[in-house]
Image (cartoon, coloured by chain):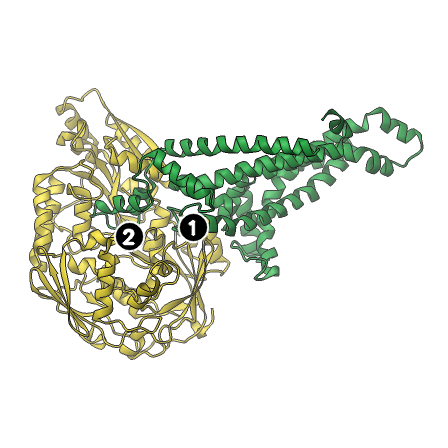
Amino acid sequence: MGRYIGFRLLHALVILALVTVLTFVIAQLVPGDGILAAMAGSVDMNDASAVARVRQQYGLDQPILTQFGDWLARFVVGDWGTSIGAGEKVHEMFMRRLPVTLELFLGATLWSIAIGIPAGIIGALKRNSAIDVTLTTGTMIGVSIPSFWEAIMLIYLLAVLFPIVPPSGYVPFSEDPIQNLKSMLLPTFVLGTHSAGLLARYVRSSLLEVLGHDYIRTARAKGFSERAVVARHALKPAMIPVVTVIGLAWAQMLGGAFIVEVIFAIPGLGRMSVDAIFQKDFPVMQATLIAVSINVLVVNLLVDILYGYLDPRVRVQR
Amino acid sequence: MSDDPDRRAFILGFVATALGMAMRPEGALAAGGAIRDQPWAVWDKNDKPVRGGIFRIAAPLYIGKMNPNHWPVNDWVTMGYFHERLMFNDGQYKATVPWLAEQVTFEDPQTVLMRLREGVTFHDGSKFDAASLKYQIDWIRDPKNKAWSVGLLAPLASLEIVDERTLRWKFNAPWAAFHGVMTNVPGYALSAAALQADSEKYDTQPQGTGPYLLEEASPGNYIKLKRNPNWWFAKASGNPDMPYFDGVHVSVIPDPAVRLANLRAGRIDVLTLDKSQYAIVKDDPNLNIRRFPGNHVAALRFNTTKGVFQDIRLRKAVSHAIDRQALIAGTQFGLARIASCLYPDNHWCHNPDLKPVVYDPELSKKLLAEAGHAGGLTVRGYYVNTSIGQTIAEAVKNMLGKVGINWQVDLLAPAALATRMQNLDYDLAQGGSVWIFDPDPTATGQYHPGGGFNFGRSKNDAAIALIEAGRREIDPDKRQKIYWQLEKVLYDSHEDAWLWWEETVVAYRKQVQGWHHEGFLKYYDAWFWAHPLWFKDGKQ
């Protein structure tokens, strides 16, 4: 296992280096002058040199290779540069927003597990029954509804018409745990219901497949109760694709979180990274893309390790 | 060009235009002197302001840097709560209102004498005086401090201290826009002591003179301001209880629908509405809705130096093909005024003799035929890719299509749009101007080769000469005539197709008291900052 992890880490480093170069190239290819666009909306533009001055300040007047070299030399020593759109140090922005997005995603994962796994198990056990049809329809609706629509509907229902939770905003857990939980209730629910639907369908089909295996029939023949058969023999192997789904969802958390973070005004990484793309905020784009890559690589590694635990055959093949 | 209208509309929320009577002081600014002698410093005796409560507002973006001379600054409304300016604009966007500068007079066309208010202190306790202002101006002009605004002080030759409260500004050439510039960025008063101690720290810990001072900031999330108990204006105006709110809380809420939800849930106290939201809330019994003329102009921008629109007949054809009334009704929900030219109809430099271009599609077709395009014309361009931008672009495209002009319009993000504008990669595109205060920056930006928005797309020699003349003429009446003439030149040459002047809609919760609409329309910035609002019974 140690050799396997070591190999995977080396592999990850190579991919990371490639991603660093690729994201830089892609960022340069994205058309647009973010500085001119931003200044045009805020200040009198009778001074043509103002934009040039700001571009110089951020090093954008340098040749592209020089910009990349300067950025890389600083990045490896922990200086991620200054955001063109926010004026803050990128490292500080990132570290401040990371726990917010992590909290959002953890909450969403808990919702999706709490809804998706029971729904999938019940659907598999009560296959083709009215309950199964209801749950399947419900999960399809959950996956199909656009998250921005669901978010705004819930805001109007639970924050305006019946003011139970705040409509938007974020209070750090360390500042006020109760307000934090209240402010994260709707966002995590909206994000969670989407993956819950997908998760339920995976659990259902995976469990149905496992329940058809010979060893399950043997277990039943031995006189184990259905609950014991499912819990002890069927559930663990059925969870392998679930691990994949959750792993994929975590890997994609930034993109998925963006809409929810914008609607609910949560100062997380998703919003930060997409704003950076629209503003052509290169330092932020580069830092977040690298962070996303690390996230994907680490999560994939963890998923692979978890596979080995859930399915001994995977361990033997390694 | 114009950017995201949501963002602009919000920024404008507190700085909207005014109707009403003009303030036309004789010659250069003469309306200086004590606060209580100012026409805008009049308070309704029936008002009984009450202290208390936290005023909650929403901003689409976090402020960014809190030093107005450093980039980026994304929220100028919040900036105004802790930083004040030397001058303010009146209801006609004319810089006639002395604020931190008590009196500003031209000794000659290249020299201004400025006397500062007495008894003003910064939030850090240091004094606002001639020495602090000179330090600040020198700081801006020092390249090592990387002030983007240094170019705005280009005409300044020297600044000398005459006495503790008086400075003499000397210019390289007559600088008629000086008062206007002092209502803008270099005119924000910053604590010299704070700049001197740590100018980088100033970006996150500002020390202004304003009614509120920074209490706490959570970047990307919120800003909390607390009442300044030593606000100079409270004493100078004889209103010791000002400002009345205990603090201001600015929440960053990017989505306009969610900002409205917050207002209706009672979580914020004021909101500049998206125009599409006006119909939803106009009859809401919990809200007071205020509508103001705004000082943006929306336009279609011609590339007059390259391509087909070098021909004035084709520019006219486009302009006559646009049904501005329908465009406003359909895309602006009726909340705009048809524009005749660059300066809004309540701007002191607006030429009242100019009428909006008439909608006449038959004339458009005739002009197209005369120009040799009877069979139709294809032109390229862009518009911003917001939902409202898309709606406007589609409407204009359809109107042009009806007369035989095929407008191939790309919907672009602001950054991409800026590059196309810079490279003159268009025939007809989104245009217009925002923040139209002093006439010079707007005119220079759009129509002068040295302006930041021209990029060589417009080379009207008569307009350029008038713009340069307007910069030098310090007599306000003569200066006004120059800009009227400039508008006529731009209008006659159809330099752009001006569509509408903005209207802003602001909703206040009924708990917010103290608003007098006529006063605000008349004196604008001066009225707003001189008449702080309060909550009924001091409770939100």
Image quarter of residue B523: bottom left
Residue B172's x, y, as percent? 9, 55
Task: Identify the element where label 2 is drawn.
Answer: loop
Q: Are marks 2 and 1 on the same chain?
A: no
Count the marks: how many? 2
Image quarter of residue B312: top left
- What residue lies at 53% left-to-right and 41% top-to-bottom? A254
Q: Is residue A202 above or below residue B171?
A: above
Residue A170's x, y, as percent? 53, 55
Chain of the residue that carries numbered disc 2 in the rendered image? B
Q: Which residue is mark 1?
A: A89
Q: Which chain is yellow?
A: B
Mark 2 residue type:
Lys
- What residue lies at 58% left-to-right and 35% top-to-bottom? A297
Instruction: Look at the image and give the colour of chain A.
Output: green
Residue B294 in sight in this render: no
Mark 1 residue type:
Lys
